[in-house]
Image (spheres, rainbow, N blue to C red):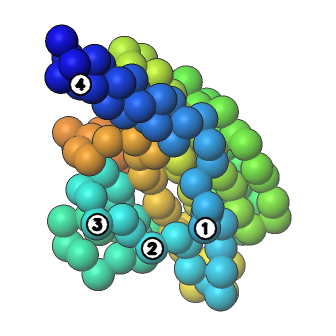
């Protein structure tokens, strides 16, 4: 009986920890010296700024200018659905996607590198180890919507 209580307490603590991680915005998001946050060790994130080939995605090309590029990214986010823009600056967007089944929050970031003419991208899960490829799938779909937007 004592072991059962210990197991139940540990499970409750694990669930509580996951809930807290899911609702709290991770530290380190944003742009520092032209770089988005580094990749976690877990396989549940992708970025255009990583050297890890398994987590690497290509940056998006700029549209005609910064304003058109930002407009196209916002339109892609809207077309994707279930994504809320949390922070929009002149050269940066942070958005959050909530998964349908488990309501996990994934952070999506865009850094508009005007000097290079590219949009750097990062998408990462807040909770769990594997995302079963969801962040890469999200990138692919957002890229498709972005490319369609003239």
Disc on res. 88: none
Mark 4 burial class by Cα count in 10 Å: few <14, some 14-19, many 20+: few
* Residue at the outermost top position: 1
Mark 2 burial class by Cα count in 10 Å: few <14, some 14-19, many 20+: some
Question: Rounded to the nearest whole Å, what is the CA distance between mark 3 and mark 1?
Answer: 15 Å
Of tags 2 and 3, the one toward the viewer is 3
- Per the image, the residue denoted by label 1 is 28
Would you say the residues marked 2 and 4 are in contact, meaning their CB atoms lie under 8 Å apart?
A: no
The image position of residue 33, as x and y in percent, is 65, 87
- Per the image, the residue denoted by label 2 is 38
Disc on res. 41: 3
Q: Judge whether 113 appears above or below 26 on screen.
A: below
The image position of residue 78, as x and y in percent, is 61, 31
Label 1 secondary element: loop
Would you say the residues marked 1 and 2 are in contact, meaning their CB atoms lie under 8 Å apart?
A: yes
Question: Rounded to the nearest whole Å, what is the CA distance between mark 2 and mark 3?
Answer: 9 Å
Question: Rounded to the nearest whole Å, what is the CA distance between mark 1 and mark 2?
Answer: 9 Å
First reached walking from the N terminus: tag 4 or tag 3: 4
Mark 3 burial class by Cα count in 10 Å: few <14, some 14-19, many 20+: few
User: 24 left or right of 102?
Assistant: right
Does residue 137 appear anywhere in the picture? no
Between 117 and 18, the one lying in front of the other is: 18
First reached walking from the N terminus: tag 2 or tag 4: 4
Label 3 secondary element: loop
First reached walking from the N terminus: tag 1 or tag 4: 4
How many labels sit on residues?
Answer: 4
Question: Rounded to the nearest whole Å, what is the CA distance between mark 4 and mark 3?
Answer: 28 Å
Label 4 secondary element: helix
Question: Which quadrant would residue 55 be assigned to in this image?
Answer: bottom left
Label 2 secondary element: loop
């Amino acid at each position: 009986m004592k072991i059962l209580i210990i197991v139940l307490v540990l499970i409750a603590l694990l669930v509580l920890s996951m809930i807290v991680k899911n609702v709290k915005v991770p530290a380190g998001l944003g742009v520092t010296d032209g770089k988005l946050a580094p990749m976690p060790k877990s396989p549940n994130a992708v970025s255009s700024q990583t050297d890890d080939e398994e987590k690497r995605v290509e940056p998006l090309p700029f549209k005609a200018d910064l304003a058109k590029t930002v407009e196209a990214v916002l339109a892609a986010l809207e077309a994707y659905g279930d994504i809320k823009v949390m922070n929009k600056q002149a050269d940066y967007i942070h958005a959050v996607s909530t998964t349908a089944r488990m309501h996990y929050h994934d952070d999506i970031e865009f850094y508009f590198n005007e000097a290079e003419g590219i949009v750097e991208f990062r998408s990462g899960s807040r909770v769990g180890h594997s995302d079963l490829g969801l962040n890469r799938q999200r990138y692919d779909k957002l890229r498709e919507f972005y490319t369609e937007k003239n």
